[in-house]
Image (spheres, rainbow, N blue to C red):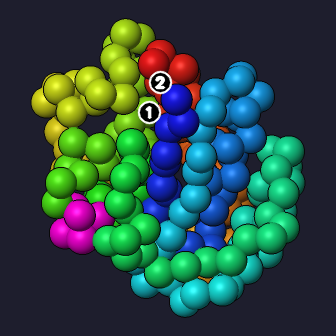
Amino acid sequence: MTISVMTVCTGNMCRSPLAERLLAIRAAAVGLDVVVDSAGTRAANGMEIHRETRRVLRGYGGDGGGFASRLLTARLLSGRDLVLTATRAHRDAVQELAPMLWKKTYTILEAARLADADETVTVEGLARARLSITTDDPALDVEDPIGRDPEVFDRTGAQISDAVDSIVRLLGRG
């Protein structure tokens, strides 16, 4: 069964494409049938991945080629099994566009934290597991690197990379 995942940030040039590409690579590497794409809550359609994000992505074995940003819409969210956002504000924006996805929408750090806290939790069990954490914790947000130094892109990349590893383990649980 194919699992459909959407990653979301603001401009769809840094955090969400990095999460998209890393999740696709790592899920495929362990034989998971996962389709991943991304969008941004304020994205301009057709933009390339930010050059610093491309550099970070290459460092993790990924490729930013062929990417084009796009604006998040309710249509793009339709039929998703999991939506992973960069921040709590993005999570809220997804839930406004697609209220029925509230049980399937998490910040990427929130989903990773829940997956790591209980090695038996599945994607379907995340909503129940969410009751055990504070969902308004600022530590659930991935920092926006846009307009910042390369070190911020590196730090954001490391955060997303670690979270993706946890998400892949979560997806592998069925």
Tell whether position 60 is magenta: no
Residue at screen point 22% across, 42% down:
103
- State whether residue 109 is above or below residue 77: above
Give the number of the mark in front: 1 or 2.
Answer: 2
In the displayed image of the protein, which residue is found farthest to the top? Answer: 120
Question: Does any portion of residue 92 appear in the rendered image?
Answer: no
Q: Which one is nearer the viewer's eye here, 1 or 147?
A: 1
Question: Does any portion of residue 4 appear in the rendered image?
Answer: yes
Element class at badge 2: helix
| Mark 1 and mark 2 residues within 8 Å of each other at the beta carbon | yes
How many marks are shown on the rendered structure?
2
> For this view, does 111 lie left or right of residue 168?
left
Report which residue position mark 2 lands on.
170
The residue under label 1 is which amino acid type?
Ala
Q: Which of marks 1 and 2 is nearer the N terminus?
A: 1
> For this view, does 11 lie left or right of residue 113?
right
Residue at screen point 73% across, 71% down:
67
- State whether residue 144 is above or below residue 47: above
Q: Which one is nearer the viewer's eye here, 105 or 74?
A: 74
Q: Which residues fall within the magenta stretch?
A: 94-98
Quadrant hosting residue 94: bottom left
- State whether residue 59 is above or below residue 1: below
Q: How crowded is the residue under tag 1: few (<14 C-alpha within 10 Å), some, or many (20+)?
A: many
Residue at screen point 17% across, 39% down:
134
The residue under label 2 is which amino acid type?
Leu
Q: Gap in Å between the C-alphas at discs 1 and 2?
A: 8 Å
Report which residue position mark 1 lands on.
112
Q: Where is residue 47 in the image (x, y as percent from the top left)?
A: 67, 85
Q: Position of residue 46 (x, y in %)?
A: 66, 86
Residue at screen point 69% across, 52% down:
21
